[in-house]
Image (cartoon, helix red, strand yellow):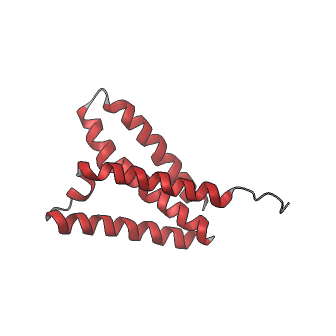
Amino acid sequence: MVLLTRAVAVFMLNSVLGLLASAASGAAVALTFGWLLPMTAVSALALAAAVAARSAVVGAGAGVAAWVITVLAGQTASGQLTASVTNAHAYLPYLAVAACCATVVICAVRPERGLQ
C-alpha cells in the first residue's frame, strides 16, 4: 500500500503544480486536465479500495479496472481514444472521485476511540 500512497501523493502534488502552471501556459492546462487529474482520481480510488479491503492487490486491481472503464466508456461514447481524458465535462467527476476516495481512506485509517 506504500506504493499506492506514494502514487496518490505524487499525482496530487503534480496536479496542484499543474493547476498553478495552467495560469501561465495553455500546454499546462491540457496536461493537467488531460492526464494528471484523471490519474489522481484513479490512484485515489485504488488507495481507497486497498485500504478498505486491506489488500494492495485489490487496490491495484480496482485502479486498473477504473482506468479501463474510463477509457472504454469515453472511447465508446465519442469514438476517440483520447476523448475519455480530454473531455472538459469529466474534470469535475474526476475531482469528486478523488475527494471521495480521500475521505474513504481518512475514515478507514483513523483510530477508533475506545478501542485503545
**Depth check: 57 or 116 in front?**
116
Give the x, y percent position of residue 114.
Answer: 84, 60
Give the x, y percent position of residue 18.
Answer: 37, 37
Residue under the point 20% across and 62% down: 81
Q: Quadrant of residue 41?
A: bottom left
Q: How many marks?
A: 0
Residue under the point 27% across and 30% down: 25
Residue under the point 30% across and 36% down: 28
Residue at the farthest front position: 114
Give the x, y percent position of residue 116.
Answer: 85, 60
Q: In the image, is 90 to the left or to the right of 2? A: left
Q: Is residue 55 shown to the viewer in this render?
A: no
**Depth check: 60 or 116 in front?**
116
Residue at the farthest top position: 24
Q: Is residue 49 shown to the viewer in this render?
A: yes
Q: Quadrant of residue 104?
A: bottom right
| Quadrant location, the N terminus | bottom right
Q: In the image, is 55 to the left or to the right of 112? A: left
Residue under the point 31% across and 28% down: 23
